[in-house]
Amino acid sequence: MGTTTASSHGATRIFRQGYADPEYVALTSRALALWEALEGAADEELIVRTGAVDHGRAEVVDAIAAALTDAGIPHETLSPDAAAARWPGIAFEGHVLARHGRSHPVRPRHRAVPHPGGTDGARRAALRHGGDGARRPRRRRDRDAVRRVHPPQLVRGGGRGSWAPALVGDLLAGRGAGLPAIRVTQEQPAHFPSRLPDQAWPSFVHWAADDDVYGLLTPGEGVKVGFHGTGPVVDPDHRDFTPVPAEAERLQAYVARYVPGVDATKPTFISCLYDNSPDEDFVIDRRGPVTVATGFSGHGFKFAPLLGDMIADLATGGAAHPRFSLSKPSPSGTP
Ligand SMILES: Cc1cc2nc3c(=O)[nH]c(=O)nc-3n(C[C@H](O)[C@H](O)[C@H](O)COP(=O)(O)OP(=O)(O)OC[C@H]3O[C@@H](n4cnc5c(N)ncnc54)[C@H](O)[C@@H]3O)c2cc1C
């Protein structure tokens, strides 16, 4: 099974600290420190500081601004006209928030993680620090768990992403734990040819009146723009990879109106998966020998090195983050 089947493919992802939820803002700071450490260890630029803008619904943008202020993360608010003068590729509306300086959001390049035919910063950093790049079993710290676990199996096949419910749902149920309902959707963002130089593009999120939209430049491919989590529910092993025509038209109409710096008539569609939890919180926990990491709800990539730490810690006897625990009451009140 290749990476093109997964959530994680394509050359770029957005790293943003702009969450309205203080707990996620704190997690982004931890993840950013780990990305930077990984860059240092790999001696390679894995993240590209592009700047980032949020605009749209006042209540969301203002809540993000408040959470960033509380976390001491510099940002500025500006009018839609001032924002458009600075970033002519985007048509802004509502409230606008931009982030600069050291806490610029960053764009993790996909070469940060292993992919066929490419380099990968994580593997190379391990090699530099005395590893041999091989994936091997690890001894557990705790007594009640199985003696040996195999991290790649746990992380890749043992219950990761969109396949986790089918792979480990029953195993977890047999141990008295239920996964929250994970809805797997097929998403269809597209790359649009840019009319502007690469430096003209920050990453952007539009908290629009109807569906939320994200965008960022993928150098050499165009500006990727997508609706967040609006695609049809699919079986991850039996999907068609084909854009829904009406949604494709809706995205082009959106881009024609709000992203004037690209050619909206020439989209190249991408197909990928979201593993949506009911409240968009991740689900990362372990029961006996079964470790699960799912529910990334379209916003997991930026946390990759932190999630790796959390999953390795869990698999070797550590406790789950309470927010991501299988014991957390579900939003509907069902445990
Ligand atoms: C279009 C799109 C845009 C996104 N943009 C962003 C963004 O800008 N910023 C951000 O932070 N996040 C973003 N995300 C979310 C992010 O990509 C995901 O949260 C992340 O990739 C989830 O990683 P994962 O390892 O859990 O799952 P996946 O990336 O889906 O990986 C699971 C892997 O397991 C493999 N697999 C499945 N079953 C088996 C098996 N039995 N044996 C072996 N292997 C198996 C699959 O083939 C796949 O490669 C985006 C997602 C999508 C779809």
Image (cartoon, rainbow, N blue to C red):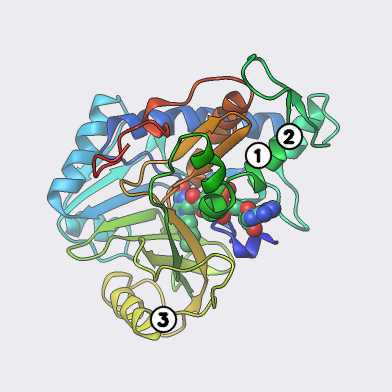
- Where residue 278 sits: x, y (%)? 32, 49
Q: Amino acid at mark 2?
A: His
Q: CA distance from mark 3 to mark 1?
A: 33 Å
Label 3 belongs to which residue?
A: 244
**Few, some or many C-alpha atoms within 10 Å of disc 1 (few <14, some 14-19, many ≥20)?**
many
Q: Is residue 14 visible?
A: no
Q: Amino acid at mark 1?
A: Leu
- Which disc number belongs to residue 150? 2
**Residue at 58% over, 45% down:** 159
**Few, some or many C-alpha atoms within 10 Å of disc 2 (few <14, some 14-19, many ≥20)?**
some
Q: Tell me whether circle 1 and circle 2 mark residues in contact (CB < 8 Å).
A: yes
Compare residues 107 and 120 and report the one nearer the observer: 120
Circle 2 or circle 3, nearest the eye: 2
Q: Is residue 190 visible?
A: yes
**Residue at 42% over, 58% down:** 201
Label 1 belongs to which residue?
A: 154
Q: Quadrant of residue 146?
A: top right
- Where residue 230 sits: x, y (%)? 34, 66
Relative placement, left or right, of 258 versus 132 is left
- Where residue 293 sits: x, y (%)? 53, 41
Q: Quadrant of residue 56?
A: bottom left
**Residue at 59% over, 24% down:** 313
- Where residue 54 sits: x, y (%)? 28, 51
Q: Would you say the beta carbon of the disc 3 residue lies within 8 angstroms of ligand 1?
A: no
**Few, some or many C-alpha atoms within 10 Å of disc 3 (few <14, some 14-19, many ≥20)?**
some
Q: Quadrant of residue 76?
A: top left
Check the image and report above or below for 143 versus 62.
Answer: above
Q: CA distance from mark 1 to mark 2?
A: 6 Å
Circle 3 or circle 1, nearest the eye: 1
Relative placement, left or right, of 56 versus 260 is left
Q: Amino acid at mark 3?
A: Val
Q: Secondary structure at mark 2?
A: loop
